Image (cartoon, rainbow, N blue to C red):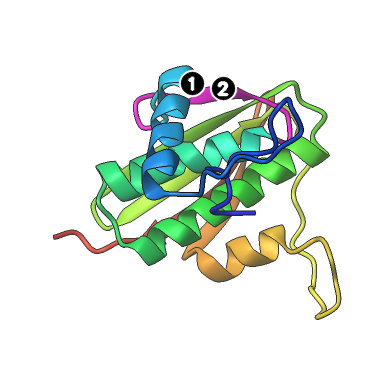
Amino acid sequence: MAGLEGIEQPGRHGGATAARWSPAVADEQALHALELYGDPTEREVLLPSLPESAAQARRLAQVVVLQRWALSEKLTEDAVLLVSELVGNAVRHTGARRFGLRLLRRRGWIRVEVRDPSRGLPCLMPVRALDVSGRGLFLVDKLSDRWGVDLLPRGKTTWFEMRVSDR
């Protein structure tokens, strides 16, 4: 769940620790992810195709979009959620060992790209109220201003863009 990354889990001795989530813990984890994987605004960073990589990608997006680019909290929340959805799709559906993450900003826009070696195209499916999965691209479609897929000689890049106000 979003916002729970900073909560400590039960320790080796079976007892849960009393630490609570805090922005400082989340910031520290985001900066650690940046140190570990690199800066996705400078170059594409490669992450292992593992479920826990979605949390690392969220942290990278959070540190860039909220702290470095100083964009609104609402835009950051939406962007971080959509990063998680694209990464989740890359991990679940491509069979890749690694995927790439890139964050770009130009006047009035941010763009997030997730590259993987599969040429299988994501499919926007209708979503019903009781569906428990399959909402990822629906969310991308509703919360971003535009999104798409660019086929590459070896794989694809799935991306979304969001408008931002430049000060």
Image coords of residue 135 (percent x, y)? 74, 64
122 lies left or right of 57: right
Image quadrant in which you'd find residue 99? top right
Q: Give, as a single range, the part of the protein colored magenta.
A: 41-51
Count of numbered circles in the view = 2
**Towards the viewer: 33 or 84:** 33
Q: Which mark is residue 37?
A: 1
Image coords of residue 143 (percent x, y)? 53, 67
Against 37, is 88 above or below? Answer: below
Q: Are marks 2 and 1 in contact (CB under 8 Å)?
A: yes
The single residue placed furthest to the bottom in the displayed view is: 129
Image quadrant in which you'd find residue 131? bottom right
The residue at the point 35 percent across, 41 percent down is 64
Against 107, is 145 above or below? Answer: below
Within-10-Å neighbours for mark 1: few <14, some 14–19, many 20+? some
| Badge 1 amino acid | Tyr
The residue at the point 70 percent across, 37 percent down is 10
| Badge 2 amino acid | Leu
Question: Does the stretch in magenta take in 50?
Answer: yes
Image quadrant in which you'd find residue 56? top right
Where is mark 2, residue-wise? 46
Against 139, is 61 above or below? Answer: above
> If you read the primary sequence from the N terminus, does the residue marked by circle 2 or circle 1 appear first?
1
Image coords of residue 83 (percent x, y)? 55, 47
The residue at the point 19 percent across, 59 percent down is 166
Can residue 151 be spotted in the picture?
Answer: no
